[in-house]
């Protein structure tokens, strides 16, 4: 019969009641599910119906790219609510039978994952689903609220740190390795300054998170870290940066040929020069002093491609003295690196970047 969808399922019981746990093809799930987005009821702006949040288009676009990678995985269950009019359980076959209708199953949790799979053309992609039959609207709302309020977001620094376990190379793993080297290597300008896993140890010098360091470095290696990682895992070559692209992607071609040590060396020399030109500001970890914090680091990383281009460096590694010369032309003193002049956030970062760039 073409008017129903069948898939294997088991009955489970918990305090909330009984529900089914099954495995369904993504195409079939897309065909029967819909999101009940919270919205005003008619013209009454004081009454709202629906349980789902609005879709994040950025998140959907990210997932659409993710599902095409060779290690794409959605291990957690999609949660659906279905009326008994649209669902029955075939005990003999151990199958759930769902009416093939685009509004048969209301999504309680997982709408972004489902949306991300729309238009997917790859190998079979099955999903585990949790299905409540004739679930009260109150319970639907509470399940959604509980899932999204109680779950703890994974620290981005922790996520980057886990790339250490990856056997294949990737922009993320290289950036993570450079961050750890900078933090632990004796003599490094970042020695003891990076919060590995995003948490401070209490030493008082850790003014940057691992995620901040990695994010800024990634931007100089790739415009699409996920795509590059997937190509490497598939054994396919990466596209080198053109001469024009390499002005900003200053580390891409080094990464492609495995010269990660040169990436670390250039960063080391650059920030060593920064520490020599503004020693008091670089070594001041008090609140309100920004050079060694996110605002200062982010602006300096934005400035690195500019200073590298000004030095005319394409394949070589500028020495500390090479970086020091243009930095000394910047009309900023140690005392200028404060949060009154350069506000926390993107505005202060942008202002500091322009001030640095004015010295070239």
Image (cartoon, rainbow, N blue to C red):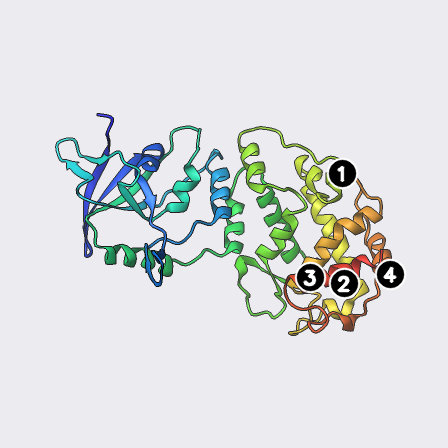
Spatial CA span between label 2 and label 1: 30 Å
Left/right placement of residue 215 relative to residue 270 reads left
Residue 195, percent from left and from top: 57, 61
Quadrant where the C terminus sits is: bottom right
Q: State the mark number for residue 244.
A: 1
Select label 2 or label 3 by which is in front.
Answer: 3
Task: Report helix, strand or loop for mark 3.
Answer: helix
Relative to 203, is 131 above or below? Answer: above
Q: Report the residue at 82% width, 43% height from top.
A: 313
Select label 4 or label 1 by which is in front.
Answer: 1
Q: Is residue 187 visible?
A: no
Task: Report helix, strand or loop for mark 1.
Answer: loop
Crowding at dot 1, Cα within 10 Å, few <14 / some 14-19 / many 20+, comes out as few
Spatial CA span between label 2 and label 3: 18 Å
Q: Quadrant of residue 43?
A: bottom left
Q: Earlier in the sequence, mark 2 or mark 3?
A: 2
Residue, disc 3: 349
Task: Report helix, strand or loop for mark 4.
Answer: loop
View extreme (front): residue: 43
Q: State the mark number for residue 329.
A: 4
């Amino acid at each position: 019969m073409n008017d129903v969808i069948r898939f294997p399922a088991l009955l489970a019981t918990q305090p909330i009641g009984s529900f089914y746990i099954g495995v369904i093809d993504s195409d079939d799930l897309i065909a029967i599910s819909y999101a009940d987005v919270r919205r005003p009821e008619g013209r009454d702006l004081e009454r709202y119906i629906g349980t789902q949040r609005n879709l994040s288009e950025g998140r959907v676009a990210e997932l659409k790219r993710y599902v095409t990678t060779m290690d794409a995985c959605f291990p957690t269950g999609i949660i659906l609510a279905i009326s008994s009019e649209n669902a029955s359980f075939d005990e003999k076959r151990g199958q759930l039978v769902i009416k093939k209708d685009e509004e048969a199953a209301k999504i309680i949790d997982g709408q972004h994952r489902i949306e991300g799979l729309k238009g997917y053309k790859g190998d079979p992609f099955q999903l585990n689903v949790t299905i409540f039959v004739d679930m009260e609207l109150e319970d639907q709302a509470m399940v959604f609220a509980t899932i999204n309020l109680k779950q703890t977001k994974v620290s981005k620094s922790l996520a980057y740190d886990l790339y250490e376990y990856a056997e294949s190379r990737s922009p993320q793993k290289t950036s993570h390795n450079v961050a750890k080297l900078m933090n632990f290597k004796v003599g490094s300008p970042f020695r003891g300054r990076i919060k590995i896993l995003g948490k401070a140890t209490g030493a008082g010098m850790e003014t940057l998170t691992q995620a901040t360091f990695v994010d800024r470095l990634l931007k100089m290696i790739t415009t699409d870290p996920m795509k590059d990682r997937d190509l490497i895992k598939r054994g396919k070559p990466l596209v080198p940066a053109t001469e024009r692209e390499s002005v900003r992607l200053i580390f891409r071609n080094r990464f492609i040929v495995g010269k990660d040590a040169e990436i670390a060396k250039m960063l080391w020399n650059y920030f060593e020069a920064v520490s020599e030109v503004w020693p008091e500001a670089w070594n001041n970890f008090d609140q309100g002093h920004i050079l060694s914090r996110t605002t200062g680091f982010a602006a300096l990383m934005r400035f690195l491609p500019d200073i590298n281009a000004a030095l005319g460096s394409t394949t070589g590694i500028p020495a500390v003295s090479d970086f020091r010369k243009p930095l000394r032309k910047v009309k900023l003193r140690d005392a200028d690196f404060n949060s009154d002049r350069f506000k926390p956030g993107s505005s202060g970062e942008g202002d500091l970047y322009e001030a640095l760039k004015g010295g070239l």
